[in-house]
Image (spheres, helix red, strand yellow):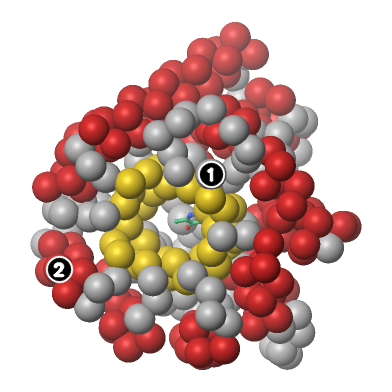
Amino acid sequence: MLLGVNIDHIAVLREARKVNDPDLLEAAFLSANWADQITIHVREDRRHANEFDLEHILKYCKCVVNLECSIDMIEYALKYKPSRVTLVPEKRQELTTEGGLNLHNEKLQKAIDVLKQEEIEVSLFIDPNLEDIEKSSSLNADFIELHTGLYANIYNALFTNINQTSYAIAELILSKSELQKRLEDELQRLKQSASLAKTLGLRVAAGHGLNYKNVKNIVDILEIEELNIGQSIVARSVFVGLKEAILEMKVLMKR
Ligand code: PXP
């Protein structure tokens, strides 16, 4: 199973000081040594990684780069030509990508076609539901990336103390048995989505909110061939270093 490391979380730290430290290019080199690809999200508001990072990484680090961006940012993909573009929705006010892509956006088909003409693989970051899988197939995407954010939130509510903190999610302050049921339902949705996608010839990735504790259930879904993980790996790297944090995750991803 392949691992993409979302290094834009390292750029969050850099942007807190507006200096080139930590250096994102160094993060790309290190991650490329131990993971299978670099995933980098260039947001419209440039709150962490930006197009200069993308340009430098593609120029100097001969690694596989998966660029996450909104449909309105594909000009940078066409200019710098990463191996893959994952189209994601974006809302300016969100802390992180909430929810999957709207597949009925009238600009989507054109964006996919233009990227594919340039031989850039296209992945769509979608919620795990069968309708969106079928639509992704009809749009001729190469990959889908299943949004595991809801699964991760339920897992946190069930197995950590987050509900006793200021980071609790009001809708998930539920009894243990209700949370357990929701977790099983969400895993079922992920499994069915991955299975249908594979049957339709789509390649399947997954990501968002995955960490050292909750990743196992996702690794067990055999149709998923790749995970894109940022926050938990970068957070762990503060204590053990980036190489070790990546290797620990790779061990958990072994099938
Ligand atoms: N995949 C996509 C499409 C994302 O937007 C993100 C968030 O950067 C991730 C994966 C990684 O999520 P996390 O940082 O929660 O591991």
Residue sitting at x 67%, y 47% = 250
* Image side of residue 169 versus residue 71, left or right: right
| Kind of element beneath mark 2 | helix
Residue 4's image quarter? bottom right
How far apart marks 1 and 2 lie (CA) works out to: 28 Å
Residue assigned mark 1: 1
Identity of the amino acid at label 1?
Answer: Met
Specify the quadrant of the image occupied by residue 135.
Answer: top left
Q: Residue at x 20, y 69 (%)?
A: 116
Confirm or deny contact between disc 1 and disc 2 (CB under 8 A): no
- First of labels 1, 2 by sequence position: 1
- The amino acid on which the numbered mark 2 sits, given as a three-letter code, is Asp
Instruction: Find the residue positioned furthest to the top.
Output: 177
Depth check, front residue: 123 or 238: 123
Tell me: 233 left or right of 208. right
Total numbered circles: 2
Residue drawn at x 69%, y 38% is 252
**Residue 211 seen in this snapshot:** yes
The response on whether ligand 1 sits within 8 Å of label 1 is no
Check disc 1: other Cα within 10 Å, few if <14, some if 14-19, many if 20+.
Answer: some
Badge 2 is on which residue? 113
**The C terminus, quarter of image:** top right
Image coordinates of residue 243 in percent, x first then y, are 77, 62
Above or below for 208 versus 219: below
Q: What residue sits 68% from the left and 62% below the top?
A: 34
Q: In the structure shown, which secondary structural element does the residue marked by tag 1 occupy?
A: loop
Q: Nearer the viewer, residue 17 or 188?
A: 188
Whether 135 is drawn above or below 115: the answer is above
Residue 70 place in picture, x, y as percent: 34, 68
Few, some or many residues within 10 Å of mark 2 (<14, 14–19, 20+): some
Task: Decide if residue 47 is in sight here.
Answer: no
